[in-house]
Image (cartoon, coloured by chain):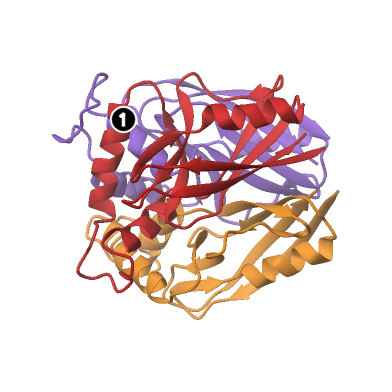
Chain colours: A purple, B orange, C red
Amino acid sequence: MIHQASLQIKTSGRGLIEITDRVAECVVQSGVKSGIANVFLQHTSASLTITENADPTVLDDLETIFLRLAPDGDPEYRHDYEGDDDMAAHIRSVLTSNELSVPISNGQLALGTWQGLFLWEHRYRAHSRSLLITIMG
Amino acid sequence: MIHQASLQIKTSGRGLIEITDRVAECVVQSGVKSGIANVFLQHTSASLTITENADPTVLDDLETIFLRLAPDGDPEYRHDYEGDDDMAAHIRSVLTSNELSVPISNGQLALGTWQGLFLWEHRYRAHSRSLLITIMG
Amino acid sequence: MIHQASLQIKTSGRGLIEITDRVAECVVQSGVKSGIANVFLQHTSASLTITENADPTVLDDLETIFLRLAPDGDPEYRHDYEGDDDMAAHIRSVLTSNELSVPISNGQLALGTWQGLFLWEHRYRAHSRSLLITIMG
């Protein structure tokens, strides 16, 4: 059985937004008890990741380190049409992922106790981001 | 057909542990001849990766570089409840992955000659790590 | 339904090669209308990623930053049998991915407007790289 659903997530600029509940809702609606939920983000300047969802300082520290790994406005960048965060956003996306495949057991996402699914907006400005959820079971 | 199996892997502190044989065994037990094996790690301070499994110095060098990318005990970290390796472990997990989807052909994992599946423990202390293997075919 | 196809991609040394059309062709041939296309690269010194396919300077800038993250010929590397790009290639592969699972809708890859699938050759020399495409729907 295959079930697909689109999600639209509004971001308010750079930062991590937890989307676990939104994806979990799609799993319940699909009626699939055992299988895989593939979460796919249709953009190249935002990304998906799984990390701890208990302490928000984890999210602050992820920003700190990714600022070092993919500096905004680096003088060596050639791609800067849309500003200092343009190329940095693409690099941050490549260093994380555009897709996650999460198992479903007993009709629910089989995440660990501290795991949350996050959409990471890498641009400074607010955006509306499109996700496609594909549930197979 | 969907087949799920849980694996428990004991780590002895930071380092990469090859899990290819354990996952391959689940594939054989499933009886699936053609499809996908999704390997999912239910933690945020360890991760999964695919890398060369012939020369162990590859694993040493991965540690060397990840120590630079996500330094232990960085003075800018705010999340440090559990010690110098706490936040570094989350970053290392985000830079790699919590899930891998590997194709199955002829009843076996269709890995390349030099590819191994690895669980990467990012904490200093030994842990017991939970994996959920979902085989679809 | 499961459909598998092998692709062989010739690279001309380090750089990103778009493979979207080759994968899209496999999807059409499978006849699957809704599901998942798993793209798997059977090597540890090349990798897969999704990034912007409109402006080629994005690809130049990705090389610039990955040279910093995983320097060629770093004096701390122990694994250097095959030259300065040997270990750097493994690290670049671990920082990106060996597999991508992309949704299929209406018989086509459901990519965003600016998204392309890329094979990233990390070795200096030309190689022939093996991909296995597994389509489930």
Instruction: Indicate left or right for B105 with B39 as reference.
Output: right
Residue toward you, B87 or A47: A47
Write the residue at 52% across / 65% down.
B114
| Nearer to me, B2 or B25 | B25
Up-down: is C50 above or below C21? below
Is C43 displayed left or right of C109 in the figure? left
Q: What element carries label 1?
A: helix
- Residue A130 lies in quadrant: top right
| The furthest residue to the bottom | B12
Query: Can you identify the residue that label 1 sits on?
Result: C58
Instruction: Evaluate whether residue B101 shows in this view.
Output: yes
* Residue C58 as seen in the image, left or right of residue A119: left
A105, A35: nearer the viewer: A35
Question: Where residue A55 sits: x, y (%)?
Answer: 44, 52
B49, above or below A31, in the image: below
Q: Position of residue A50 (x, y in %)?
A: 52, 48
Q: In the rendering, at what x and y percent does residue B62 appear? A: 37, 66
Q: Which residue is drawn at 20% across and 28% down?
A: A78
Badge 1: residue crowd in 10 Å (few <14, some 14–19, many ≥20): many
Asked if residue A120 shows in the view, the reply is no
Q: Mark 1 belongs to which amino acid?
A: Val
